[in-house]
Every structure is written in C-alpha cells, then in structure tokens.
Image (cartoon, rainbow, N blue to C red):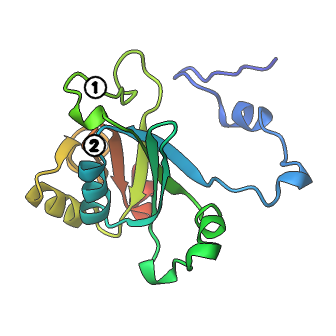
Amino acid sequence: MADLQPASGGLTDQAALGCCSDPHPSTKDFLLQQTMLRIKDPKKSLDFYTRILGMTLLQKFDFPNMKFSLYFLAYEDKNDIPKENEKVAWVFSRKVTLELTHNWGTEEDESQRYHNGNSDPRGFGHIGIAVPDVHGACKRFEELGVKFVKKPDDGKMKGLAFIQDPDGYWIEILNPNKMTTIV
C-alpha cells in the first residue's frame, strides 16, 4: 500500500480519498438526522439549548416503562412544526437534530456525571454550531455566564470558540465563511 501518512502524521489527501467509496445508489436519500447526548437535568439543558443557543424544541417523547425521555431540538421555526398527526415523521425527517436523552432521576443524583469524551478515555469530541459572528455570539455567551473551553482569540485556531453545556459537552462555535482562514 502507498504511503498512508505524510511526515506530519495522518493520512495524505490522496490516501484519505483512496479509503472512500462512491455512495451506493440506494443511499441517495440517506441523511444525518440526529446526534444524541445524555443529559442529567432536562430543565437546565432545555434552557441552555433554547435560550442560550436559540434552538427550538421540536418534540418530547416519554418512555415511562423504561424511565427516560427524549427531547428533539433543531434550528427550526416553531410555527413550521406540524400538528400532532404529522409531527413525528416531520421531526425524524429534519436534517441534524439534537436528541437529548434524560434518564429519570439523574437530576437528583449528586454523583451522576456524563463523560464528554475530551479527557481519557477520549472518544466523542463536540458538536458544532455555525453562527454569523463568532465574537458577537461569544460576547453574549459570556454575558450569560456560559463556560468557555476556548475563546475565539485564544490558542492557535483563531476565530472559533468552544463552550460547554450544563453536562460539560463541548460545543464549537464557528463562522462557516471564516473557516478557510483556520483550516
């Protein structure tokens, strides 16, 4: 096999492309629909994702026999959410929703913590939110008392930030039009 790693580490562009296949025609209508985060306290998390990040709660599902609830959020206009009989299919056809999973009782368990994947053992890293003005968004986050992992002018990657939600999950704040200066 050809040289898979440039001297700096990682795959070369050519090697990365060589690992990929053209999508099978049967996958043409597939879409990334959701990512799920486990949350300790739905009151804190729903407040954070709606008031701080501006997302909309699309639908809540309760599973009493299994003692958990699911909250689906996305950047959608609440006036576009259909009535009940069409709502479930609509929610599950949105591109990239955030599913918050609350196991009942965790909000009262002082020892309950979720691993955010950014310390050993590393795994999941973060979700990303595109904003028109990173500095403006971060100024507002700072005023609202949001915890920062990295502010936009810190570190080597200037112009993007990382904040944390109530469970410590990292959220990258980026401007798509400025990414060419970063990557």
Asked whether, in this view, residue 5 is left or right of residue 125, the answer is right
Mark carried by residue 41 = 2
Mark carried by residue 112 = 1
Picture layout, residue 38 above or below residue 9: below
Q: Nearer the viewer, residue 119 or 182?
A: 119
Picture layout, residue 112 above or below residue 74: above
Characterize the local packing of mark 2: few (<14), some (14-19) or many (20 or more) Cα atoms within 10 angstroms: some
Picture layout, residue 161 above or below residue 143: above
Residue that appears at 64% across and 21% down: 5
Of the residues under marks 1 and 2, which one precedes in the sequence?
2
Which element carries disc 1, helix, strand or loop?
loop
**Amino acid at the residue labelled 1:** Gln
Asked whether, in this view, residue 109 is left or right of residue 123, the answer is left
Q: Disc 1, disc 2: CB below 8 Å?
A: no
Quarter of the image where one finds residue 159: bottom left
Which element carries disc 2, helix, strand or loop?
loop
Q: Nearer the viewer, residue 142 or 87?
A: 87
